Image (tube, helix red, strand yellow):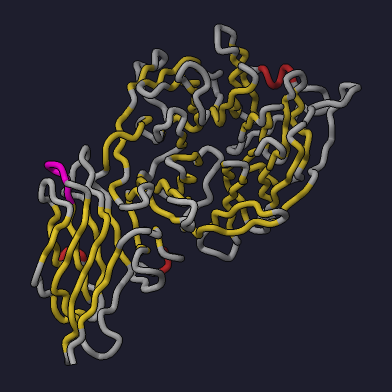
Amino acid sequence: MAQEWSITIKPPFEGLSPRWYRDTNSTYGSATQFNDLVDVDLSNPSSITQGPAFTSLTIVNSYDSNNYEAIVDIIDRNVYNNTTYGISASYIWSITATTATAIRELPAGATGISIEEYDGYIYYMYNTAAASDIGRWNLAATWTDAWGSTNAVTDSNTFVKSDYHPLHNNGVALLIGNERYLGIYDGVYLAMNEADYKSGSIVKDIKDNIYNTYVAVDRLGDSVINIYSSDLSAVDDSGSPVEFGPDDTIKLGGYIGAMFVRNGIIYVTNQDETDDAFTVSYVNGARISPLQYVSGDLPKFNNTTWYKGFLTFFSDGYIYQTGQVDTSEGFVLTKLASNSNIHTIATPFSTLIIADNTSIYKNSGYSNTSKSTSLVFTPSNDINLGIIKNIVVRTNALETGAGCKIKIVKNGESESAARYITISSVGEIMHTFRNIDIVDIKNFKIIIDWSTGSTTKPCHIREIYLTGQTKEV
């Protein structure tokens, strides 16, 4: 006997379903979770919509005919007068909301790695042919490219060549990731190997929450977070380097990546060596508590920021966001934007800045490559097939050009074979489609495709409501 059924997709939208990357046709999760979300923004608790598009900043480079070179690290705050600074392999850059200008060429043979501000100076770390060094600029006319090797104290002056040289200003000192060592500059003394985590170890990231400084150390798959008081000094009263150990240690095992800090909470990315994904977790006393699983490479220290209330990070071609759309809701996860060539991301001016191989960009407008894919739904719990009769889609009041397609992909068919409806009626907030009669359904999923939409006028999906009935076979 035929039975009526309905499915509603509406707020709160809960983001990607658990372990979504293991099954593109997953049925596990709630109706408001998704098998995939590409270039999709979840920051509005009442809707899902297109993620941001990006526009290139103006490039000024008097050293090389205004050509761009990939910027690999950006100071993630407004350093001075609406300006921040970045580093590429060969140059130091000043960055505003509109322009990136090469202001200093690094020494011949140098490869820029990281950059930070501390106590009114810009510090930049770069690799040389066999080692590394730290340069310093006073934000005026004085540049000292070999400042580090010139000023490091005796017996703590090892400069290691490495792809990992995170720099961090904890408000008291400049902390320096120096491969197996943790370095420190306290405003007077520079010591490059204050803590020695032994051969094979790598300092992956450094963060603080005012009270404590957290150092993420990868030790050949046996990772730890070492916790220090933020009141650190490079030397003791006699001027000798301080050999200090951590006040506490969180043992993780596996591998560790970048950390975040927000509202005093330390978040960390780490991966079990037997897993095909990494976790985003938070420090919870002497352990970490997982929040989300993400498929991809662990983010580096220069690939994280905070944007629209979400932890934002880059991994394997996507800028992910995770966080709460409201304090009463759980953590959600989405792929906010896609770009396979990103080197670093930041939000120094409240806009999202990304730097890839070809330029440096800020978010502007809306993506028209956005697409969401629901879980797979089964309209009948017995041997009967399903029929979709009616679809109602609620949106914001659409402006001219705004819209999307709602595709119904049934029985594992290809997306190109799917039936679809077009959402585009100007001024409409409830788009009703009756008697569409998609028949012989064993299962189906819903794809929201914004490729026909606008890059300046968004289409917010607030609710999708389907009704149908079963068909006896």
Quarter residue 59 falls in: top left
Most extreme residue toward the right is 238
| Left or right of 52 on screen, residue 184 | right
Quadrant for the N terminus in the image:
bottom left
Magenta residues, dominant SS class: loop
* 400 part of magenta stretch: yes
| Left or right of 319 on screen, residue 388 | left
Residue at left 49%, top 52%? 327
Q: Which residues are magenta?
A: 398-403
Residue at left 11%, top 46%? 426
- Residue 458 percent across, percent down from the top left: 23, 44
Residue 353, placed above or below residue 377: above
**Can see residue 131?**
no
Residue at left 56%, top 27%? 115
Most extreme residue toward the left is 435
- Residue 97 percent across, percent down from the top left: 38, 24
* 264 part of magenta stretch: no
- Foreground pick, 98 / 130: 98
Residue at left 30%, top 86%? 381
**Can see residue 66?**
yes
Quadrant for the C terminus in the image:
bottom left
- Residue 167 percent across, percent down from the top left: 62, 31
- Residue 191 percent across, percent down from the top left: 76, 27
| Left or right of 451 on screen, residue 272 | right
- Foreground pick, 165 / 38: 38
Residue 214, placed above or below residue 331: above
Residue 107, placed above or below residue 32: above
